[in-house]
Amino acid sequence: MHIKIIIVSIVSLLWLSACSNGGNEEATNRNDQNEVVENQEIKADNDAGENQQRETKDNNGNVENQEAATTEKTIGLYNKNNFHTKQYAKGNITVDYPQLADDLDKANKINRVIAKDASYFFEKDYYESYTGEVKYNIPFVNDELVSITYAGLLTSPINSYPINLSYSTLVNMQTGEKVSLSDLVNLDDEFIKAFKLGDIVTDQSSEYKQEIKKYIASLDDQDLLKKFLEADKMDFPEVFVYVTDDVIVVTIAVVHALGDFISVQISKDSVSFK
């Protein structure tokens, strides 16, 4: 009897031990699974953080590249600093004019056009007996167009009054060809109207401006159109054109009593460009 009780007790203890071990293993497995899940979540969070950092870096790189591209586009290839000054001299006349420093075929072509226009009147002896200095200005330049103006006061012992000289040159920076008003805009009734309504470029009195306004209003539209079609031709020195960022300026030769020339600025928004 005692032996049976002992055997039963041993069996019971073995069974309880097995159950306890099973529970511990199950708990251990659950803990291991939880650790795996936690590790996976931590790894996923770390990967996501690294991806975000990489994306941020890439985005910053893209922004920097875009800013660099925008800056390069804004600066462009050409500006006033690309030009240096040369001087033409004949008799008692000197003319300063700009030249590109580049020794490239296109730059050389542009330089030839500029140099020819700058000296044209004096090479043709239009002002043979005169004395004076002609200076230049560049009111506009970009990768497509350069606009150059020339101005000077010329005197002569055989004339009782000096001459105010004003002329200009437009050059296509892509082709090296000279550009005229008819190449730049559509010359039609709308352009004539815009010209007559334009602002007078002068530092003279308001009375002078009114006098010039009356003179311009009296000009025949068809005669003006013919002159504009011949504008910027050096052998027809009656109309020259230059441009700025915002306006087109048309300069017309007039009698000395009106100042030798008058300049009218027209908003670029008022004309039709080609």
Image (tube, grey):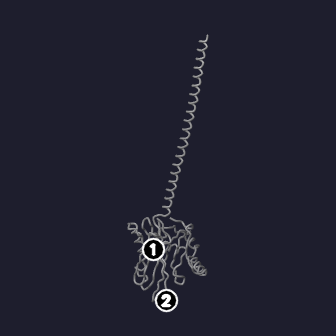
Residue type at numbered disc 2: Ser
**Mark number, residue 164:** none
Where residue 246 appears, as percent x and y from the top left, is 55, 68
Q: Residues within 10 Å of mark 2 (few under 14, many from 20)?
A: few
Identify the image quadrant of residue 90: bottom left
| Residue that protrudes farthest toward the top in the picture | 1
Observer-nearest residue: 208 or 91?
Answer: 91
Where residue 60 appears, as percent x and y from the top left, is 52, 53
Where residue 121 appears, as percent x and y from the top left, is 43, 79
Residue ID for mark 1: 233
14 up-or-down from 191: above or below = above
8 up-or-down from 23: above or below = above
Residue type at numbered disc 1: Lys
- Mark 2 vs mark 1, foreground winner is 2
Observer-nearest residue: 8 or 224?
Answer: 8
Identify the image quadrant of residue 271: bottom right
Residue ID for mark 2: 160
